[in-house]
Amino acid sequence: MTESNSIKQPAQKDVGRPNPIIQLANISKAFGSNQVLNNVSLEIERGHTTVIIGPSGTGKSVLLKHIVGVIRPDQGKVWFDGRRIDHQSEADLVTVRTKIGFLFQMGALFDSLTIGQNIRFPLTEHTSMSASQQNQRCNAVLEMVGLAGIENKMPADLSGGQRKRVALARAIVLEPQVVLYDEPTTGLDPIRADVINELIISLSERLGITSIVVTHDMASTNKIADRIVMLYDGRIVADGNLDTFTHCDNDLVQRFIKGQAEQSDLERIRVVSQ
């Protein structure tokens, strides 16, 4: 990572054979008797946006946490940029984590800090930048997310959509190679959600960021995804582009992307209501 005040220009997107920046090989993870991930293998190509969909409780967020080493697999291996990380110590993972931004579902801003202090926090923790350099970087990322000039406000002064955008500015302030998004449009109305979608696309194009997005939002998926991966019962059941999913004859996939309940669930509801 450089310590210049400017934001890096994008690298060219890779062409030809896939060039994975993240590799998950045969990952399994259980919490007690609950098998959350079951022998999952996945390669994430750099410079592209991969969207992970699937019902609640199928392991999507757990998969993200394996990528940053917050959760370690019971079995399997994790590589980041050619470096195996699943067996590294917390101290060794610090360098890896500075290359990965994380947008938490609810933003996870510090309520007692100003917007500027929130965004500068990673710079203070992980760089030797001067206060002036930090302020310039903070202003640059706020401008990128369309919120220039709000650095002295508090999180409570902002709307839900604005807080998400501030959290995204903080996620990119260290100029990461990868940004992980955990349900980035949850709790937002369709217009504010589309602002987040546009920012994900813009950051990918302007900065060459690799994006991994966990979501239930199919409108968002349709707009931002280069690739869609569907998890069900801890396994990958479908993997492809939007056209592949649209024409897939898997009933489970079709019901999810169309938002249709299982017939067995509907029958139970009807029995109870009679």
Image: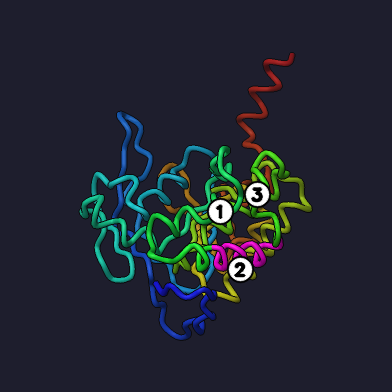
Q: Earlier in the sequence, mark 3 or mark 2?
A: 2
According to the picture, the residue beneath numbered tag 2 turns out to be 140
Q: Which residue ends up furthest to the right in the rendered image? A: 191
The image shows residue 9 at horizontal and vertical percentages of 54, 80
The image shows residue 11 at horizontal and vertical percentages of 49, 82
> How many numbered badges does the structure rendering display?
3
Q: Is residue 152 left or right of residue 179?
A: right
Q: How many neighbours does mark 3 have within 10 angstroms: few (below 14), some (14-19), or many (20 or more)?
A: many
**Secondary structure beneath label 3:** loop
Q: Quadrant of the C terminus?
A: top right
**Secondary structure beneath label 1:** loop
Q: Quadrant of the N terminus?
A: bottom left
Q: Is residue 6 above or below residue 15?
A: above
The image shows residue 236 at horizontal and vertical percentages of 43, 53
According to the picture, the residue beneath numbered tag 3 turns out to be 185
Check if residue 79 falls in the magenta segment.
Answer: no
Q: Which residues are magenta?
A: 135-146
- Residue at horizontal 45%, vertical 56%? 122
According to the picture, the residue beneath numbered tag 1 turns out to be 250
Residue 247 or 216: which is nearer the viewer? 216
The image shows residue 76 at horizontal and vertical percentages of 25, 53
